[in-house]
Image: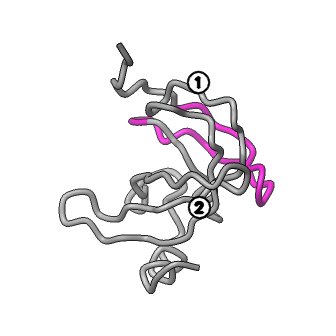
Amino acid sequence: MEDKRFRKNDSGFMCKSCGKEVLPLGYTSRNHCPFCLCSLHVDINPGDRANECGGILRPVQVLPDSKRGYVIIHRCERCGEEVRNRAAHEAKVQPDDMELLIKLTAGPM
């Protein structure tokens, strides 16, 4: 049986897309770059780092969510899978680029 529980993994990293340093959020897992919104396809379940794909997840669309703020839709450049991640636009440390989030609400890029 698959374990679908969230695993906190809040370590900083260097973005593989834009090269900027990304700091930990401090309260939940940081799963994408706040500057370019890209991520890596490394999780099967949130925070498990069990996915061997490792491709760059590019943001293709942002959906407003009344309970969670914004949800970023990412598409993997390597395997094509789409995944959803909650935006961290209200974070105290390196909040997500609000202009980019708004731009992506217009539809798929």
- Which residue is painted at 39% across and 53% down in the image? 86
- Which residue is painted at 63% across and 42% down in the image? 41
Q: Which residue is mark 2?
A: 37
At numbered mark 2, what does the secondary structure look like: helix, strand or loop? loop
Q: Does the magenta portion include 90?
A: no
Q: Which region shows up in magenta?
A: 10-28
Say if 90 sits above or below 99 in the image. above
At numbered mark 1, what does the secondary structure look like: helix, strand or loop? loop
- Amino acid type for the residue under numbered disc 1: Ala
Q: What colour scheme was applied to this rendering of the protein?
A: one colour
Distance from Cα at disc 1 to Cα at disc 2: 21 Å
- Amino acid type for the residue under numbered disc 2: Leu
Q: Does the magenta portion include 20?
A: yes
Predominant secondary structure, magenta span: loop
Q: Which residue is mark 1?
A: 50
Q: Position of residue 88 (x, y in %)?
A: 43, 55
Q: Quadrant of the N terminus?
A: top left
Q: Position of residue 34 (x, y in %)?
A: 57, 58
Label 2 environment density (alpha carbons within 10 Å; few <14, some 14–19, many ≥20): many
Classify residue 34 as left or right of residue 78: left
User: Toward the viewer: 1 or 100?
Assistant: 1
Say if 60 sits above or below 53 in the image. below
- Which residue is painted at 47% across and 36% down in the image? 29
